[in-house]
Amino acid sequence: MTVKTDALGWLLNTQVLFAAFGVLLPRSFRVWAWRLVFPLGVASLVLRWYVAGHPPMRNLFEAFLWLPPLLVMGTWWTRLREGLDTTRLDACLGLLVAFPLAFVFSAQMVPLPPALQSPFFVPHVLGYMAAYALLARAFVLACGKHERASERNLMWGFCLLTLALTLGSVWGNEAWGAYWQLDPKEQWSLATWLIYVACLHLPRRHFARKVLLGLGLLAIVLTVTWINLSKLFPGMHSYAGI
C-alpha cells in the first residue's frame, strides 16, 4: 500500500476522507460530505484526462475513477425518484472504491494500445462502469429493504450492461474479426449478464433475488479484479489491468 502525494493523489485521498465522513457522521453532516465527493471525483477525472492525453479508461485505476461520482449521482437520483436518503449506503460503496484508488492501484500512465483507439472505447467502458455502479446499488438497496429503488437500479443497470456487452461484441468484430472469442473476461461478462437475467425473472421480494443480486455483484468484482489481473487467465483483455 502506497500513498499518492501528487495532485491527483491528494484528490483521491480527500475522496476517501469524505466518503468515510459520509458513513460515520450524523445525517446533516454526512449528506454534505458525500456530496463533496462528486466535484472531487470530476476534478480527478479531468486532471487524469489532461495529463494522460486520453479518456481515463485505459486500465483498472482509470476505470475506477468514474465510480465515486457515479455513485453520488445515484444518491441524487434515488432521492429525487424515490424520496430515499441512501447517503450512508452509497458512501460505503464509495469508500470501498476510493480506498484502492488512493492506496492500492498503480497510477502509472501507459499509452493506449491500438485496439483501444476506437470510437467504441468510451461508450463501452463508461457503459460498464455505470452498470456496475447501478447493480452494486441494487444489491445494497435490496439488503436495506428498499425493493422499489433496488428494482429501478437493477433495470437500468441491466440495460447498460447489455448495451456495453453488445458494443464490446461489435468492437471485437472490428478489431479482431469476430464478435465473440473464448476470452476469459468475455466469458465472465456473459456469465454476469446471465445471472442478472435470472434475477429479473424472480419476484421483487423473493429471497432468491437478493441471493442472485449478491452473486451478480460477486461476479462483477471477480471480473474486474481477479479475472482481469490474474496471470491464470491470459487473454485479449489482459492489458486492461496494467
Image (tube, rainbow, N blue to C red):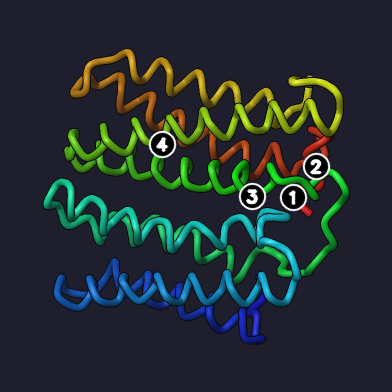
Q: Position of residue 167 (x, y in %)?
A: 63, 32
Q: Which residue is mark 3?
A: 122
Q: Position of residue 17 (x, y in %)?
A: 41, 77
Which residue is rendered at x = 68% and y = 42% of the image? Answer: 120
* Amino acid at circle 2: Ser
- Residue at disc 3, secondary structure: helix
Q: Quadrant of residue 170?
A: top right
State how far apart marks 2 and 4 are (Cα). Answer: 25 Å
Q: Is residue 232 left or right of residue 29?
A: right
Which residue is rendered at x = 25% and y = 76% of the image? Answer: 32
* Amino acid at circle 3: Val
Q: Quadrant of residue 134?
A: top left
Q: Is residue 214 left or right of residue 218?
A: left
Q: Which of the numbered marks, if any, corresponds to residue 109?
A: none
Which residue is rendered at x = 56% and y = 62% of the image? Answer: 65
Q: Which callout, 2 or 4, points to the residue nearer the camera?
A: 4
Q: Which residue is mark 2?
A: 238
The image quadrant where one finds the C terminus is bottom right
Residue 213 against residue 21 in the figure, above or below: above
Q: Which callout, 3 or 1, points to the residue nearer the camera?
A: 3
- Residue at disc 1, secondary structure: helix
